[in-house]
Image (tube, grey):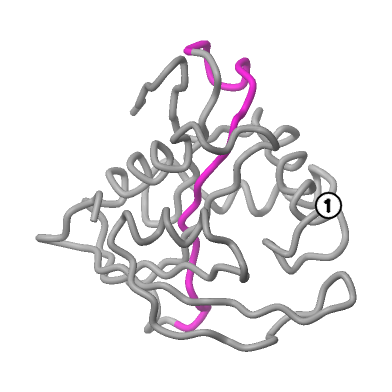
Amino acid sequence: MTSERTDVQVRAGVESDLCALTKIYNHYVRETPITFDTAVLTPEERRPWLLSHLQDGPHRLMVATDTDREPGSGRILGYATSSGFRPKPAYVTSVEVSVYLAPGAGGRGIGTLLYEALFEALAGEDLHRAYAGVAQPNEASVRLHERFGFRHVGTYREVGRKFGRYWDVAWYEKELGPGSDPAG
């Protein structure tokens, strides 16, 4: 599955993407409160995460590249994932979704392309809800989620400490499954 906009291709992630995906993620670990990880990770430490996102099923990894080359050869501009929401069995029809863009890749509609592809890929899965936690402040992420039909359901106040201060996380929810529109 591919989506294109101004030389951007969205496809399923593959193992050869691991180093580039880790580099993008580590930017957020080092520079932002977007993730509450506080230590950078090696590609080997991220491998289980990558392998838990299959090319079918409810846990997916979609990657945006700047060319239409073969998987693993274009510069990765960002990625979107759907992951297990909580480990207990009754949560199996819920996923947590996220988007991470490479530094300098924002403002080009790449997050939108990634979510379009992700929700299209999830459309046939036995899923009921998608959730997204957005560390505050992050207006770009709030706008992206609202554009896709997510609604704010609550905020955990000062739930994480990073860079010597506490951060809030706003939680958003979106209905999935039969009859729901992938674009909101």
* Position of 58 relative to 47 (above/below): below
**Left or right relative to 56: residue 36:** right
Q: Which residues are magenta?
A: 68-88
Residue 160 horizontal side relative to residue 180, left or right: right
Specify the quadrant that holds the C terminus: bottom left
Secondary structure under tag 1 reads: loop
Name of the residue lying farthest toward the bottom: 157
**119 up-or-down from 84: above or below:** above
Q: Is residue 92 above or below residue 25?
A: below
Q: Residues within 10 Å of mark 1 (few under 14, many from 20)?
A: some
Point 47% across, 12% down: residue: 68
**Horizontal side of residue 95 vs 160, given as left or right:** left
Residue 179 placement (x, y as % from top left): 10, 60
| Residue 3 highlighted magenta (yes or no) | no
Q: Nearer the viewer, residue 19 or 102?
A: 102
User: Is residue 71 rendered magenta in the image?
Assistant: yes
Q: Residue at x 80, y 52 (%)?
A: 45
Q: Looking at the picture, which amino acid does disc 1 mark? A: Leu
Rendered location of residue 95, percent (x, y): 42, 66
Q: State the residue lying farthest toward the top.
A: 69
Which residue is pictured at 35% across the width and 39% down the height?
Answer: 117
* Residue at (52, 78) in percent of width and height: 87
Residue 182 drawn above or below residue 11: below
Q: Is residue 119 left or right of residue 109?
A: left
Q: Give the total number of marks visible in the rendering.
A: 1
The residue at which mark 1 appears reads as: 41
- Residue 115, position as x, y percentages in the image: 39, 46
- In the picture, which quadrant includes the N terminus? top left
